[in-house]
Amino acid sequence: MIDQLTIFLPHALMAIAIWRLVRREDLDDDPALPSRKTLFRKSAEGSGTGDA
């Protein structure tokens, strides 16, 4: 029983830590890159019909 617990407990804690890291919102934000909103706005501005 002790052997199974010593294997299960660290793996369970690592899985919880990885799950919490993956679920973080700021993980996808890179300050060196433009934001998604800026990229979406630029692509929407450039997709006009061409009637200018």
Image (tube, rainbow, N blue to C red):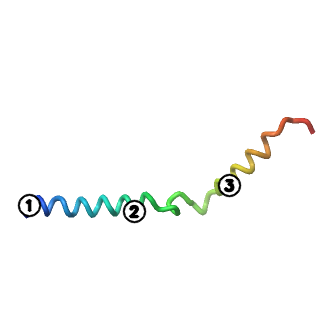
Q: Position of residue 50 (x, y in %)?
A: 87, 35
- N-terminal of the pair, mark 2 or mark 1, is 1
Residue where numbered disc 2 is placed: 20
Q: Which residue type does callout 3 highlight?
A: Lys
Q: Which residue type does callout 2 highlight?
A: Arg
With respect to residue 6, does 50 lie above or below? above
Q: Position of residue 19 (x, y in %)?
A: 37, 58
Q: Is residue 49 left or right of residue 25?
A: right
With respect to residue 40, does 32 lie above or below? below
Q: Position of residue 22 (x, y in %)?
A: 42, 57
Residue where numbered disc 3 is placed: 37
Question: Within 10 angstroms of label 2, few (less than 14), some, or many (20 or more) residues?
Answer: few
Q: Is residue 31 left or right of residue 40?
A: left
Distance from Cα at disc 3 to Cα at disc 1: 51 Å
- N-terminal of the pair, mark 2 or mark 3, is 2
- N-terminal of the pair, mark 3 or mark 1, is 1
Q: Which mark is residue 3?
A: 1
